């Protein structure tokens, strides 16, 4: 191979590497905004099983604590409920009914093992789903960063709150777009309470918010 041909190859390799980097960066910038099929594949492969592990416990406990303290006996809707972990961490006495929806059939199949006369799990896209009933608490637990139009979705569900009903949000600060979503939520709704859960070893922070449409 001639020197000129080696040079051409290395330039081509260099360009290819840069193109790949740009493609990867584009993929990464999509963050959690991905198709229902992608969620399905990832759940089936066990990629989200870590959500049931100890480092995630604190944010579930905060959300469950808010429900028990602020709306004991609540009718709860959990959007993007995944494998139903929040229901598993909710004491029986704290809710009267629970509906969990998620776009992934694999996640709902696992969640449905907890189904009872007071709880239902449905495969549904929360950007399209319209519940038939109203709720005391509507939960957006690590789902807003997965949606095309998170604020419009929250607004649509807020209309399904009973009088005095609450919106519960958990957002991992590392998720793309989380700061903007938080800022817009706090402008649109009254903040009843807000905490930050920091996992010291994993260096992950979640913001847990209680919001109220008509002021506290
Ligand atoms: C990061 S996981 C969080 C799961 C669970 N809420 C938790 O906190 O462990 C995001 C969840 O949102 C679901 N999801 C994403 N887009 C959705 C959509 N448009 N409608 C319903 N669920 C969706 C995913 O399938 C996944 O279960």
Image (cartoon, helix red, strand yellow):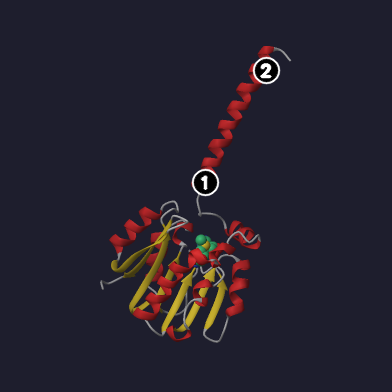
Task: Tell me the SS state at disc 1.
Answer: helix
Task: Name the residue at the right extreme.
Answer: 1
Disc 1 vs disc 2: which is toward the camera? 2
Ligand 1 within 8 angstroms of badge 1 C-beta: no
Residue 9 visible (yes or no) = yes
The mark that comes first in sequence, 1 or 2, is: 2
User: Could you tell whether 136 is left or right of 20 in the image?
Assistant: left
Image quadrant containing the C terminus:
bottom left
User: Could you tell whether 117 is left or right of 150 in the image?
Assistant: right
In terms of image quadrants, where is residue 160? bottom left
The percent position of residue 69, horizontal first and vertical second, equals 35, 80
The percent position of residue 152, horizontal first and vertical second, equals 39, 61
Residue at the (43%, 58%) spot, across then down = 200
- Looking at the image, residue 203 lies above or below residue 63: above
Residue at the (56%, 65%) spot, across then down = 103
The percent position of residue 195, horizontal first and vertical second, equals 34, 65
Q: Residues within 10 Å of mark 2 (few under 14, many from 20)?
A: few
Kindly report the distance in space between the C-alpha atoms of the residues bearing marks 1 and 2.
33 Å
Q: Which residue is mark 1?
A: 28
Q: Which residue is mark 2?
A: 6
Task: Name the residue at the front extreme.
Answer: 201
Residue 126 visible (yes or no) = no
Residue at the (41%, 52%) spot, across then down = 177
Instruction: Please name whichever residue, 40 or 1, is drawn nearer the observer in this view of the structure.
Output: 1
In terms of image quadrants, where is residue 63? bottom left
């Amino acid at each position: 191979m001639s020197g000129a041909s080696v040079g051409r190859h290395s330039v081509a390799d260099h360009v290819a590497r840069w193109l790949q980097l740009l493609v990867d960066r584009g993929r990464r910038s999509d963050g959690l905004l991905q198709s229902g099929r992608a969620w399905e594949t990832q759940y089936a492969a066990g990629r989200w099983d870590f959500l049931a592990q100890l480092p995630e416990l604190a944010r579930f406990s905060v959300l469950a604590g808010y429900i028990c303290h602020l709306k004991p006996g609540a009718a709860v809707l959990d959007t993007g409920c995944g494998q139903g972990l929040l229901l598993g961490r909710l004491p029986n006495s704290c809710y009267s009914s629970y509906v969990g929806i998620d776009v992934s059939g694999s996640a709902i199949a696992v969640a449905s093992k907890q189904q009872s006369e007071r709880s239902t799990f449905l495969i549904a896209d929360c950007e399209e789903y319209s519940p038939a009933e109203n709720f005391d608490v509507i939960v957006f637990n690590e789902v807003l960063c997965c949606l095309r139009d998170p604020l419009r979705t929250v607004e649509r569900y807020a209309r399904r709150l009973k009088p005095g009903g609450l919106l519960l949000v958990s957002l991992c600060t590392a998720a793309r777009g989380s700061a903007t979503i938080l800022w817009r939520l706090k402008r649109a709704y009254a903040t009843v309470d807000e905490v930050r859960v920091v996992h010291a070893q994993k260096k992950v922070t979640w913001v847990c918010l209680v919001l109220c449409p008509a002021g506290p």
